[in-house]
Amino acid sequence: MAEDLVMTDTVAAPIIEHFRDLSAEFDNSGMEVGGHRMDTITACGEMSQFVEDGANAYLISWGQTLEFCGETAALIAGNTNVFEISLERLDTDLSHLPTI
């Protein structure tokens, strides 16, 4: 019978930190997307009314994408080197995920 492969805490630590940092980057990128939306509208001047709907759709779609990716990276960080699952915690965590 094969033995289970176990990752040491020393090996797991940089992986966990990487995904925590990645989650934070996704969370912080939302402000940049909002800035790009406003820059686009402003740059169009008198024609801004023609791009505003598309710019709003851009903001919403990227906002949802960044939120999903941030939550996914946080889940990976939280579950790296974890070999048990708390179904109660899982139910709580999944109860607030957005419907896409």
Image (cartoon, rainbow, N blue to C red):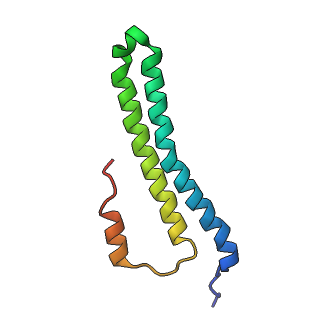
Q: Is residue 88 left or right of residue 14?
A: left
- 5 vs 51: above or below: below
Farthest residue toward the right? Answer: 10
How many numbered marks, from 0 up? 0
Q: Is residue 53 left or right of residue 7?
A: left
- 52 vs 59: above or below: above
Q: Is residue 40 left or right of residue 13?
A: left
Q: Residue at image x 42%, y 20%?
A: 41
Q: Nearer the viewer, residue 60 or 29?
A: 29
Q: Residue at image x 47%, y 16%?
A: 43
Q: Quadrant of residue 46?
A: top left
Q: Nearer the viewer, residue 84 or 2?
A: 84
Farthest residue toward the top? Answer: 46
Where is residue 84? Give x, y as percent.
Answer: 47, 81
Q: Residue at image x 48%, y 51%?
A: 69
Q: Quadrant of residue 38?
A: top left
Q: Quadrant for the N terminus, please.
A: bottom right
Where is residue 100? Give x, y as percent.
Answer: 33, 47
- 72 vs 36: above or below: below
Farthest residue toward the bottom? Answer: 1
Q: Nearer the viewer, residue 19 or 5?
A: 19
Where is residue 16? Give x, y as percent.
Answer: 60, 67
Q: Residue at image x 37%, y 71%?
A: 90
